[in-house]
Amino acid sequence: MIQMAEGLYGGVLVFVLAMFVGFEIITKVPPTLYTPLMSGTNAISGIVLIGALVVAGTDSGTIGAVVGFGAVVLATVNVAGGFLVTDRMLRMFKKGRNQP
């Protein structure tokens, strides 16, 4: 039980540090690089979706299945929304017709 708590604390620590580092990096990005940044984020979200599918598919009990399913749903929404935003941003740069 103590080893599990240590692993949980370590995971939370890494998550919090990653949030701070990610925030600092994202705030330094100039507006002209938003579209490439969004495309890269979509690729990372796709990897997260694959990981969520693996977690949801393992036999880890009811709680693991519920958390895995929630992760799959949220990652899918993130990927789909990211592609829609990227597509809209790219249409802004096209000459001629900018309407959908």
Image (cartoon, rainbow, N blue to C red):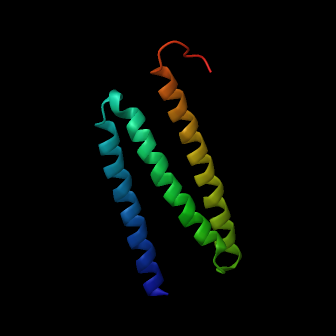
Position of residue 22 in the picture relative to residue 2 (left or right): left
Q: Residue furthest front?
A: 96
Position of residue 6 in the picture relative to residue 62 (left or right): left
For the residue pair 37 and 11, the one nearer the viewer reads as: 37
Residue drawn at x 47%, y 82% is: 4
Count of all numbered marks drawn on residues in the image: 0
Residue 30 in which image quadrant = top left
Image: 89 above or below 62: above
For the residue pair 78 and 27, the one nearer the viewer reads as: 78
Residue drawn at x 49%, y 28% is: 89
Q: Residue 23: percent from the left, percent from the top?
A: 35, 45
Q: Residue 38: percent from the left, percent from the top?
A: 44, 40
Residue drawn at x 39%, y 33% is: 34
Q: Residue furthest top?
A: 96
Residue drawn at x 45%, y 53% is: 44
Residue 61 in which image quadrant = bottom right
Q: Residue 82: percent from the left, percent from the top?
A: 54, 41
Q: Quadrant of the C terminus?
A: top right
Image: 13 above or below 96: below
